[in-house]
Image (spheres, helix red, strand yellow):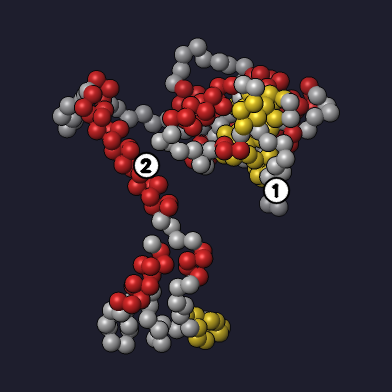
Amino acid sequence: MNNNQKRNQHKIKLFYFHELSDCLSQLIAPENIDRTITVSNSIYLNQLQQVVAEQDFSDDLNDSVFMLKSNNIDEDDPAQLALFERVLREGITYKGEKYVRSIKSPAMGRTQRTEFIKEKYYKNVFQRVALGKFPRLTNINKWEAALGVSRSSALAIPYIPRIVVIPDYEKEEIIEDVWKVVKCIGDPVQQELILEEKKKQREYFKAKKDLIPSATNLAVLPRLPNKKVIVRGEEITAPDQSEQKTFSGWDKENGVCQGSCRELIRKVMF
């Protein structure tokens, strides 16, 4: 395979959850936003491109798909959660055409992105990606993960590689040092404790996000003067901490903590 071979990339539209609107019982994506996101080619996108070419030669891959980013959903707001469930269940209308939720990769789950494709292409694309096999009974997480493999970036190679298949390792059930096994759902007290702990975690991370200082606040903090130093035979510029107190508020010459510096940082950040 050529080392200089690069993956094909596609620019597809990107919308945010708060940009959706509800009009006549339809969830509408705005038409005046030209924001895009770059994604690498994959088996899934390759199959989608073929389906688009077969069903509607006048259509384009970039117009048949878009991403929805939902990282700004407030998990404590039942209305927003209900709206997001409705988005997944009913789909989104964009420029008069219906788009439905498509296959999701693990990376998309971590970044809270969901892809939507035109409804008229969904059945054929899903048929190709699943190789025509649809289990009657399965674990939904494993099924989603199996389909998500098709979203991995891939490069076409002009030969059949040598492949070694290693049997999967299955660990036996752990039975030693197990004191008690209890169904959490059957114990309302334990369930309440877990929900309370999750609520505390959400409040903590939300407060942590709100307390991050802005670039404007950081700009007014005292800066260390620069000095010229020689590193590996090259002259570079580095902060001169011998002439100025460090950001922690300590004076390096006499080892005395300067409270004024700490107070300034506290006022700026909080």
| Callout 2 amino acid | Arg
Query: Is 20 on the left or on the right of 230, as rendered?
Result: right
Q: Is residue 115 above or below residue 238?
A: above
Q: Is residue 194 above or below residue 257?
A: above
Residue 17: quadrant of the picture: top right
Report the quarter where the C terminus lies: bottom left
Question: For the residue labelled by badge 2, is the local secondary structure a helix, a strand or a loop?
Answer: helix
Residue drawn at (40%, 64%), measured in percent from left and top?
Answer: 269
| Callout 1 amino acid | Lys
Question: For the residue labelled by badge 1, is the local secondary structure a helix, a strand or a loop?
Answer: loop
Residue drawn at (36%, 29%), measured in percent from left and top?
Answer: 170
Report which residue position mark 1 lands on.
6
Q: Residues within 10 Å of mark 1 (few under 14, many from 20)?
A: few
Which is closer to the viewer, label 1 or label 2? Answer: 2
Query: Which one is nearer the viewer's eye here, 173 or 35?
Result: 35
Query: Which x, y percent locates residue 205?
Result: 38, 47
Residue 169 makes an appearance in the image = yes
Report which residue position mark 2 lands on.
202
